[in-house]
Image (cartoon, rainbow, N blue to C red):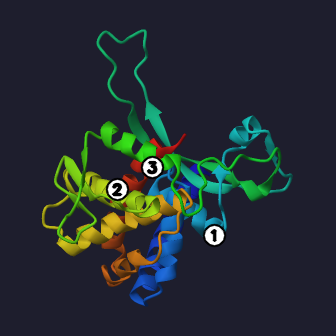
Amino acid sequence: MNEERKQRAHLMVQRTLALLADSLESGRSQNLRDFLQAVGRFHRYSLNNVCLILAQKPDATRVAGFSTWKTLGRSVRKGEKGLLILVPMVYRRSEQKAIVEEPEPRSLGFCTGFVFDVSQTEGEPLPEIGKVSGDPGKALLRLEAAYRHFGVGLERADGLGGAKGVSMGGKVRVLKGMEPAEEFSTLVHELAHELLHRSGRPEALSRRIRELEAEAAAYAVCSAVGLDPGTSSADYIHLYDGDAVALRASLVAVQKAAADILSRLDP
């Protein structure tokens, strides 16, 4: 049964990415914006699981397992069908047998599990943590702390030759005097460059690809904290010409960068 579920899950992932690639080739940019918003909402989940959640419940907003909802004072309504996801199986060395420091946990593969959207539950209302509208609020301070966490220097400049920000490899410079929302978006964009393009990604990536990947990550992060990210990521739709394989490789990198940044913005 687990193998059948895994096969079904992989087929759903492939179908979701293929449909996204087709929609981008047709110029339907809203589909990409919806997908990037989902990446922001479900930043604790892998790209595969984001695809699975969207394939089964496109209007999902907040998902968790049965037991997690219980701890939040909510219960899954009787008769609700769970959303299939892939769950990594992790090996950890027994502490009793460890003579030297334990290595990092090692993945042994995947099994299947289920999560439920908040709309499938009932009980205590959930706090809207970190939601803002047009103003990043404390998220801006957390973002500056994230720079320190990732070891990226941050400077503000009076002028950058017409640019709002620039990634310099270990250091970012941004323009002084921007409005908070614009500053937040610029800081995310430049930090995304540092995470996406300064640590092992192919150097052959064109400047256009690098810019659009950083903008896609910024779109996901900004939408996750409640800012209106606009439509500046729309050019991303022209990048892969329906090539689902290349699109997936890019989205994997974008999703990881967005998730890494959002993990530092959680209160």
Question: Residue 187's mark?
Answer: 2
Left or right, residue 144 beside residue 47: left
Residue found at x 38% / y 40%: 145
Front-lying residue, 7 or 9: 9
Sequence order check: which comes first, mark 3 or mark 1? 1
Q: Amino acid at mark 1?
A: Pro
Task: Please provide percent x and percent y for residue 267.
Answer: 55, 40
SS at circle 1: loop
Which of the 4 image quadrants contains residue 71? top right
- Distance from disc 2 to disc 3, alpha carbons, whole Å, reads 9 Å
Taking depth in this image into account, of 174 and 22 the one nearest to the observer is 174
Q: Quadrant of residue 187?
A: bottom left
Q: Comparing marks 1 and 2, which lies closer to the viewer?
A: 2
Image point 44% across, 44% down: which residue?
141
The residue beneath circle 3 is: 140
CB contact under 8 Å: marks 1 and 2: no
Neighbourhood count class around disc 3 (C-alpha, 10 Å): few under 14, some 14–19, many 20 upward: some
Q: Residue at x 38, y 67 (%)?
A: 216
For the image, the number of numbered tags is 3
Residue 214: x, y in percent? 32, 64
- The residue under label 3 is which amino acid type? Leu
Residues under numbered marks 2 and 3 in contact, where contact means CB atoms less than 8 Å apart: yes
Provide the secondary structure element on which disc 2 rests: helix
Label placed on residue 58: 1
For the residues marked 3 and 1, what is the alpha-carbon distance in whole angstroms? 30 Å
Q: Disc 2 residue type?
A: Leu
Above or below: residue 222 compared with residue 206:
above
